[in-house]
Image (cartoon, grey):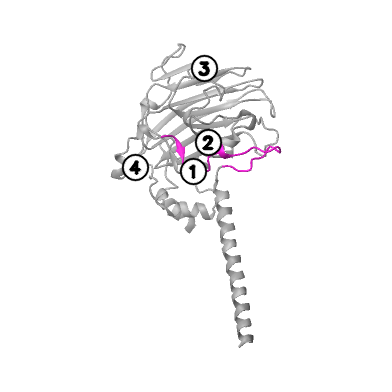
């Protein structure tokens, strides 16, 4: 109970806006790295939620305007996207469909939180469904492409809600949520389900649910957090938490989906964007945030990864567990060196005594 209260005092138990009574994300698996992060300045800057404000120019909320037409205020859509009174259907449960919806207005908020009410459902059983939804914060909008209905080599942030495992050797359990940050130089590899460009991910059973399903994406002070509410318990579950993420302002929010030989209905019911009122240092305020290049600190460049014949990768992003293992190995190495040094010193001392 003491530990639980400590997390609440640091803002991890905040109430989220737009969802009455919905608590904020709780701590994930506790490791040395996570504890160090919580003790640092990033955790201390997490707001309590009382200063968050809905930004209607970046939100999609019922009742929708423009039902039955090919456009709506503040949002553009293309491809197979269909607007109804209850949802925006990006793709129907049919093969080879692509659709997307994009906000008109570029977002110039430095700190924000987006809540997405969505539904993925269809008649396909077991693995006979696909492919999934992508949520975007990118420089370019309304550009169709092969990545869940949108362009590859994008600039910005993508969150993939992937329902079909293309890589038969994967140990992941699908559906699976993953995050990718791109400066235009990286390509999403569908055959590996984007594994080599993934920064972090989690299994999330969001398909064919009988109740509402939600996703929250929070970006504040270079920290990116993804949370889910899939169990109809009115509470968030932590999925992804990354520090050192660099995202510029002036990009666009959007959502897209695609089907191939397999299909699903991919529906967006609402998108709510909230401004986080966070204080920045004078140096941060003087930065031209529109000129920041998308990227992530403290992670090995995905371009340096090498795919081996077994289907595994010899190197990948330094996730929390990898950092923890590296620190543990370093600590064990220091202990071993200290013990060996002590033994060698003792042997020399004994040899010197015998000599005299």
Q: Quadrant of residue 16?
A: top left
Instruction: Name the image quarter holding the C terminus.
Output: bottom right
Residue placed most toward the observer, 271 or 139: 139
The residue pinned by badge 3 equals 81
Q: Is residue 192 left or right of residue 47?
A: right
Circle 3: element type: loop
Q: Is residue 168 left or right of residue 155?
A: right
Q: Is residue 291 shown to the viewer in this render?
A: yes
Circle 4: element type: loop
State which mark lies toward you, 4 or 2: 2
Indicate the position of residue 94 as horizontal and vertical percent values: 62, 17
Q: Which residues are magenta?
A: 293-316
The residue pinned by badge 4 equals 278
Residue placed most toward the observer, 75 or 184: 184
* Mark 1 / mark 4, whichever is N-terminal: 1
The residue pinned by badge 1 equals 242
Label 2 neighbour load within 10 Å: few <14, some 14-19, many 20+: many
């Amino acid at each position: 109970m003491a530990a639980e209260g400590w997390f609440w005092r640091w803002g991890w138990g905040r109430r989220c806006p737009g969802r009455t009574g919905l608590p904020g994300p709780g701590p994930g698996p506790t490791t040395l790295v996570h504890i160090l992060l919580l003790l640092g300045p990033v955790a201390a800057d997490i707001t309590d939620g009382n200063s968050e404000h809905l930004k209607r120019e970046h939100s999609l909320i019922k009742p929708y305007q423009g039902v039955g037409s090919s456009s709506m205020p503040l949002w553009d859509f293309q491809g197979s996207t269909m607007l109804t009174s209850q949802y925006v259907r990006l793709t129907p449960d049919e093969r080879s469909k692509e659709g997307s919806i994009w906000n008109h207005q570029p977002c110039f908020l430095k700190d924000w939180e987006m809540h997405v009410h969505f539904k993925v459902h269809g008649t396909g059983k077991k693995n006979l469904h696909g492919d999934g939804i992508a949520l975007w914060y990118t420089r370019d909008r309304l550009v169709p492409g092969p990545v869940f209905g949108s362009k590859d080599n994008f600039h910005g942030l993508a969150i993939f809600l992937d329902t079909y495992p293309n890589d038969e050797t994967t140990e992941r359990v699908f559906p699976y949520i993953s995050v990718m940050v791109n400066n235009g130089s990286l390509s999403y590899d569908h055959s590996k389900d984007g594994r080599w460009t993934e920064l972090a991910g989690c299994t999330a059973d969001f398909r064919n649910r009988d109740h509402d399903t939600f996703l929250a994406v929070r970006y504040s002070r270079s920290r990116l957090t993804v949370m889910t509410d899939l169990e109809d318990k009115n509470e968030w579950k932590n999925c992804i938490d990354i520090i050192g993420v660099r995202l510029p302002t002036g990009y666009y929010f959007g959502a897209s989906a695609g089907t191939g030989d397999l299909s699903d209905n991919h529906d967006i019911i609402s998108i709510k964007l909230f401004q986080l009122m966070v204080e920045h240092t004078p140096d941060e305020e003087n930065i031209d945030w529109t000129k920041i290049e998308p990227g992530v600190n403290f992670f090995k460049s995905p371009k340096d990864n090498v795919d081996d014949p077994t289907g595994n990768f010899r190197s990948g992003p330094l996730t929390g567990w990898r950092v923890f293992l590296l620190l543990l190995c370093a600590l064990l190495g220091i202990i071993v060196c200290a013990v060996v040094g002590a033994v060698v010193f003792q042997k020399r001392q004994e040899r010197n005594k015998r000599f005299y």
